[in-house]
Amino acid sequence: MDIEEWKEKILESVEARCGATFANLMFDFGDDAKGEYDLFVPESTNLVMWSGMSKGFSMALSELHKEGRISFKPDSAFLYMMDGLVLSLPIAMRSRTTPPCTGVP
């Protein structure tokens, strides 16, 4: 699937739910979305929003955000636990200099 196809499918999924967690999207797209790529908080090199994504899926999410078509908002780690997918990284609890590879729910 090319990036434009990913973008369209991601938007359809987000709009159908009136929002979505990364866990929701990973369940929606299954193995096609899985891979070795991470998505970082914009302008950060160590705050991971989600990991284990395919290149096309992560690039599509990044482009949709840059285009202003989706936004990323922090959410409760409990919500991700309920969805059944959580990052295996320590959770960033406050704004400060963070150690490498800290997760943001």
Image (cartoon, helix red, strand yellow):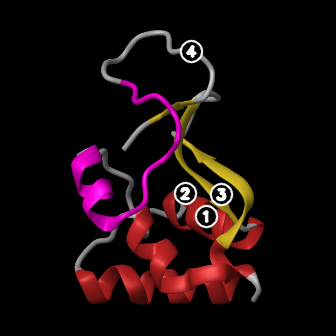
Is residue 75 visible in the rendered image? The answer is no
Residue 86 sits inside the magenta stretch: yes
* Quarter placement of the N terminus: bottom right
Cβ–Cβ below 8 Å for labels 1 and 2? yes
Q: CA distance from mark 4 to mark 2?
A: 26 Å
Vertical order, 65 against 3 (above or below): above
Dividing the picture into quadrants, the one containing residue 11 is bottom left
Q: CA distance from mark 3 to mark 2?
A: 21 Å
Q: Residue at x 51, y 39 (%)?
A: 41
Classify mark 1: helix, strand or loop: helix
Classify mark 3: helix, strand or loop: strand
Left-right relation of 27 to 4: left
**Precedes in sequence: disc 3 or disc 2:** 3
Dividing the picture into quadrants, the one containing residue 15 is bottom left
Q: Residues within 10 Å of mark 1 (few under 14, many from 20)?
A: some
Residue 83 sits inside the magenta stretch: yes
Q: Is label 4 or label 1 in front?
A: 4
Location of mark 2 (residue): 66
**Precedes in sequence: disc 3 or disc 4:** 3
Vertical order, 91 against 58 (above or below): above
Total marks in image: 4
Q: Which mark is residue 86?
A: none
Cβ–Cβ below 8 Å for labels 3 and 2? no
**Precedes in sequence: disc 4 or disc 2:** 2
Q: CA distance from mark 4 to mark 1?
A: 26 Å
Q: Position of residue 83 (x, y in %)?
A: 31, 66
- The range drawn in magenta is 77-92
Location of mark 4 (residue): 99
